[in-house]
Image (cartoon, grey):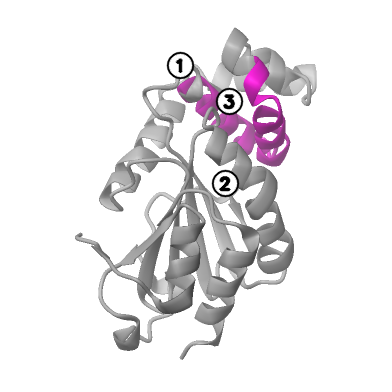
Amino acid sequence: MSWQRIKVGVIAVGLLAAGAYLSFGGRVAQAAAADPQSVNLPDVDPHKTQGSKTAPIVMETFSDFQCPACKQLYLGTSRQIADSYVSTGKVYFIHRDFPLPGHAYSRIAARYGRAASQLGKLEQVEQVLFQNQEKWEQTGDVDGTVASVLTPAEMTKIRAMIKTPAIDAAIDKDIALGKTYNVTQTPTTVIHCKGQTYPVSGVVSYDVLRTFLDQLLSSK
């Protein structure tokens, strides 16, 4: 799949000003009438999603727990999007793992996050890993960081799961998918709406992203 970077009025300018770019194939004026849920989204783990599958917008965020920009996006924009758009049925959110090879502990953190999601504890683990990022990236104590918000019984299950090939295989599938979107950095959020796909790279403020999402929702 090839992507063409173009500016889309004020929204693209806003995204560029926020340190991100907007790119997609084709032109908005020629958007297909297909619903976003008809988009082929492979390997969607329901444990790593939020919202309704029938939402008009699908957002996939490729993230790295050791990435400072991912922390910024998560603690700011993503939480507000969850409150305003995911909980109201407007956005179906998918968390994708994209640990960067240059980060010593990001793969380990991704394993813990993936395992925690199987227990329904992704939100708690995501929050503690991002909030304490500066600590565990210095010590490598991902296990202790995660253990601070889970029970001993839950940690026993997670420690067993992270040793299984299935966890790494699931992470590798997310990485491979990201490469089909030309993801080269984190965070990258891929937005699907009405037959169009918009990869947005970098940290985007809530106000800018809200304006863009509202524009997508109001378009025909």
CB under 8 Å between callouts 1 and 2?
no
Mark 3 is on which residue type? Tyr
> Viewer-proximal residue, 49 or 18?
18
* Secondary element at tag 2: helix
CB under 8 Å between callouts 3 and 1?
no
- Residue 145 higher or lower than 52, as above or below: above
Residue that mark 3 sits on:
112
Quarter of the image with the N terminus in it: bottom left
Q: Mark 2 or mark 3, which is nearer the start of the sequence?
A: 2
Quadrant for residue 36, please give it: bottom left
- The x, y position of residue 212, in whole percent, is 53, 72
Magenta stretch, residue numbers: 107-135
Say whether residue 201 is left or right of residue 216.
Answer: left
Mark 1 is on which residue type? Ala
* Secondary element at tag 3: helix
Q: Which mark is residue 76?
A: none
- The x, y position of residue 93, in whole percent, is 57, 58
> Viewer-proximal residue, 37 or 186?
186
Q: Mark 2 or mark 1, which is nearer the start of the sequence?
A: 2
